[in-house]
Image: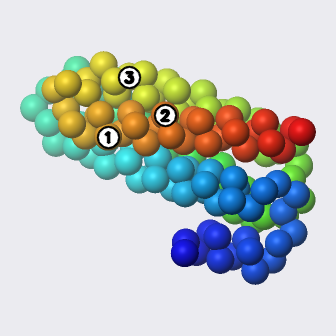
Amino acid sequence: MSYAKQMLESDNSSIVDTSLLVATIEALNDCAQACIADAGADLRGDDVGSMVKCIRLCLDCTDVCTATVGVISRGTQYDEAVTGPLLQACVAACARCAEECEHHAKRHPHCRICAQACRRCEQACRELLAAARS
């Protein structure tokens, strides 16, 4: 059982489904880790100049995911004015990063893995956003 799940179930004050919140937290953490690892792998490659956009988007995605997971991990009352824009920014950052990584996926397996993590996170954030608005 993940720590996110244990913490959220121990408090049970969230207004959204705990399993959906846990899935989003895990997707955000996985995405941030994949993006930072991908940026590092890109920097170690022999064609860094052609990977600048990918590196930048990976770093942006890492920062957005990290900020978003920090806010939603609190499990307190959902404040649409704060959490909604963060989730929307995460959807946008993950989509752009995945799109860029998909361009490099055939040459760089780390980009393929990063793109998959970004797409999973993008979907998880969309689902949490939709659930919180209903």
- Answer left or right for 37 relative to 132: left
Mark on residue 119? 2
Mark 2 neighbour class, 10 Å CA radius: few under 14, some 14 to 19, many 20 or more: many
Which residue carries the number 1 mark?
Answer: 113
Quarter of the figure with the N terminus = bottom right
* Among the 4 quarters of the image, the one containing residue 90: top right
Rendered residue at 73%/44% (across/down): 128
User: How far apart in space, not on screen, are marks 3 and 2 (Cα)?
Assistant: 12 Å
User: How far apart in space, not on screen, are marks 1 and 2 (Cα)?
Assistant: 10 Å
Q: Nearer the viewer, residue 14 or 51?
A: 14
* Among the 4 quarters of the image, the one containing residue 49: top left
Task: Tell me if I can see residue 45 in this picture.
Answer: yes
Which mark is first along the chain, 3 or 1? 3
Image coordinates of residue 120 in percent, x first then y, are 50, 40
Mark on residue 47? none
Amino acid at circle 1? Ile
Which mark is first along the chain, 2 or 1? 1
SS class, disc 1: helix
Task: Tell me if I can see residue 86 in this picture.
Answer: no
Rendered residue at 47%/37% (across/down): 118
Which residue carries the number 3 mark?
Answer: 100
Image coordinates of residue 112 in percent, x first then y, are 29, 34
Q: Would you place residue 1 above or below residue 103 in this image?
A: below
Amino acid at circle 3? Glu
Q: Is there CB contact under 8 Å for labels 3 and 2?
A: no
Q: Would you place residue 70 above or below residue 37 in this image?
A: below
